Image: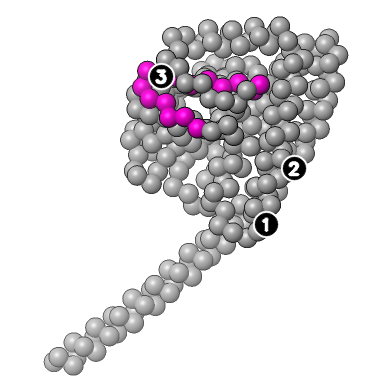
Amino acid sequence: GGAQIELKENSKLILNKSYLKKAQDSISLIKGSASFKIAKLAKNQKVNVYTPTAVVGVRGTEYDIQLASDGSLAVNVEKGDVQVGNDAGSKNVSADQSVETSIENPDLNLKDELKDMKDWAENKDAQVDKDPAGKVVAIKDNLDQANKSQKKVLEALSDDKNAEGEVDQFMFNQARSDGLFESASGIAGKHSKDKKVSRTMSTIKKIYSRLNRLNKILEEKFNKLDQIYEEKSKELDEKMNQFDDKFKDMDKKFDNFEK
């Protein structure tokens, strides 16, 4: 739709499938950093960027996203407004402002624009090196939360209700699981001699495996719902066509009557 995304080195981004015919595009930034330029969208459209620690929603703006090696997040807004949200709440971030959140504390901290996001990421990386065991434990706790949240999404879909509200939570949890597992793997690889890191990483692998299975089940359910919605949409179109044909017949009868 004319959006420009500049992906920086050592970064990973996923272009997501759109479920339930929602009028939005979505992206998952799993690792690294990216700059976004998104033209002003229609009223019912938006672009969501899912990250390991928050969701960034926009309708038209210019902004940068930086992830640290532990999954912590910083967002700088250059133009327009950005809505950033996670389990702790949401913040509206305007031009020349930034927002930060970490894996230890999900609260969104609104600040003046960061002058150097690369420097911010390097400071976060230095904190990881000081306490790698503490960071992987925090990542494990976040993955546990994602697992619980994804189970709630599955329960909601099983209730056979309108599932549009569940799409955002599902996509966020999926980005959380992929991004945080990538972060934990990087920390564990760098600090492989730390026994606590290794033990926690073993637990993280088990949680991530469960999350992967859960994510696949949810993807299948959303795909089935898409099929149902498409079939219902076709049925509705057929009924509308039938009504159109009836009105055309009535118009002909009235024309003949007038003659």
N-terminal-most mark, 2 or 3: 3
Query: In terms of depth relative to the viewer, which is nearer, 89 or 188?
Result: 89
* Secondary structure that dominates the magenta span: strand
Please tell me the numbered disc located at residue 141: none
Q: Badges 2 and 3: C-beta atoms under 8 Å apart? A: no
Residue at 67% over, 41% down:
149
Label 3: few (<14), some (14–19) or many (≥20) C-alpha neighbours in 10 Å: many
Q: Image quarter for residue 253?
A: bottom left
- Looking at the picture, the colour scheme in use is one colour
Q: Is residue 100 magenta?
A: yes
| Residue on which disc 3 sits | 97
Please tell me the numbered disc located at residue 158: 1
Labels 1, 3: front one: 3
Which range is magenta? 90-104
Q: Badges 2 and 1: C-beta atoms under 8 Å apart? A: no
Q: Tell me the quadrant of the picture where the C terminus can be found.
A: bottom left
Q: Is residue 120 left or right of residue 78?
A: right
Q: Is residue 223 left or right of residue 141?
A: left
Q: Image quarter for residue 211?
A: top right
Residue at 61% over, 11% down:
124
| Residue on which disc 2 sits | 213
Q: Amino acid at mark 2?
A: Arg
Q: Secondary structure at mark 2?
A: helix
Q: Label 2 vs label 3: CA separation? A: 39 Å
N-terminal-most mark, 2 or 1: 1
| Residue 216 visible somewhere in the drawing | no
Q: How many marks?
A: 3
Residue at 42% over, 15% down:
112
- Residue 181 horizontal/vertical position (percent): 70, 27
Label 1: few (<14), some (14–19) or many (≥20) C-alpha neighbours in 10 Å: few
Labels 2, 1: front one: 1
Label 2: few (<14), some (14–19) or many (≥20) C-alpha neighbours in 10 Å: few
